Amino acid sequence: MLILGIETSCDETAAAVVDEEGKIRANIINSQVAIHAQFGGIVPEVASRQHLKNILPIVERCLEEAGVSLADIDLIAATRGPGLVGALLVGYTFALALARGRDIPIVGVDHLQAHILAVFLGPPPHPAFPFIATLVSGGHTAIFLVRDPMDISLMGTTLDDAAGEAFDKVAKVLDLGYPGGPVISKLARSGDPAAISFPRPLLRSDDLNFSFSGLKTAVITEIKKNRGHHKTEDVCAAFQEAAIEVICAKTLAAARETGINDIVVAGGVAANPRLRRLMADTCETAGRRLFLPPADLCPDNGAMIAHGGYHTFKAQGPTDISTDVYSRAVFHET
């Protein structure tokens, strides 16, 4: 089976062809970072218009690189949510048009489920079910119990800002541009994480929730109060260390609470080298096994949507095309 995956939940127009065994034939991503950087963040209307402009050439390029045509595609998978509603409409309605015009079955895919399952697109070894998955991105920071590809329970989530959102806002105050995550990560390498003491919100709470708004505010207050007294590299390192320490601690707490050995960290921020290193050290010390998607499959991409679509189709069959575009039917509370 060959699956065409289409992803337009935010500001990447992406398409991929993946087979049922998870082999990626092509994975094309068109980023809008340069466009949104001038605004200091994503403008939903601009993102939607760019998706309209890019979707057809990106899909055509993807099929060409995979060496296939639409006649070879057995299933179309498209993101149904969560995400920017206008952006989702572009990708999902485009996928619907292809499916109807070519009489190809279609499935709507939960964006977060796809991020979690992206770990199976990398080389083995892979995690064993059940496993704990921590998803860290610009829009989400949450911990899940994953019993199988279609049985995923939410254990804890952010009460305010997502981790990636906090990175972007701190970077904006430091005049580092957008997106903030990569530049903060780069500068932090030459900074001292112990130079400034920032809070670790909810680090010792009795739940698995996150809160990054207070940390973000503490960093911004420190920058404004002592601008010029701290090296930018030290601010970046201290902020990054505080955020990542909480993510690692909460993830390990979820593993202890459930008695589960295998841990997955996914989402765009999972490409952060310091998060990958500290999480690896944390898991090794605790005797847990850590699994990470390849760094290039951590940001939004079509391959993860295609792979998630395969599992959705196998479990539920094709999606009823009369249903609403924005849907989150996979997850439930523990």
Image: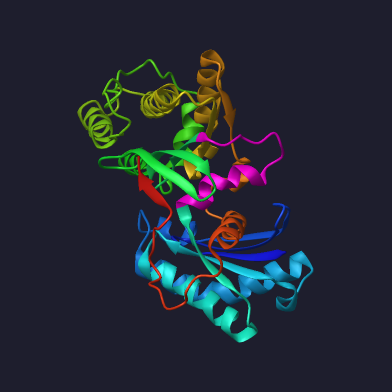
17 in relation to 173, above or below: below
Pinpoint residue 83: horizontal percent, then vertical percent: 39, 59
**Is 198 in front, or is 245?**
245
Q: Quadrant of the N terminus?
A: bottom right
Residue 309's x, y, as percent? Answer: 57, 60
Residue 294 visible in image: yes
Rendering coords of residue 323 (x, y %): 40, 74
- Residue at image coords 36%, 67%: 85
**Numbered label tally:** 0
**Quarter occupied by residue 277:** top right
Question: Position of 193 compared to 125: left or right?
Answer: left
Is residue 62 highlighted in magenta? no
Classify residue 95 as left or right of residue 188. Answer: right
Placement of the C terminus among the 4 image quadrants: top left
Quarter of the figure with residue 89: bottom left
Which residues are drawn in magenta? 112-131
The residue nearer to you, when weighing 315 against 189, is 315
For residue 122, what is the image quadrant?
A: top right
Question: In this rendering, does residue 167 appear at all?
Answer: no
| Colour convention of the picture | rainbow
Q: Nearer the viewer, residue 314 or 50?
A: 314
120 part of magenta stretch: yes
- Report the front residue among 84 and 121: 121
Residue drawn at 35 percent across, 63 percent down: 43
Q: Position of residue 328 (x, y in %)?
A: 39, 58
Residue extending furthest toward the bottom: 101
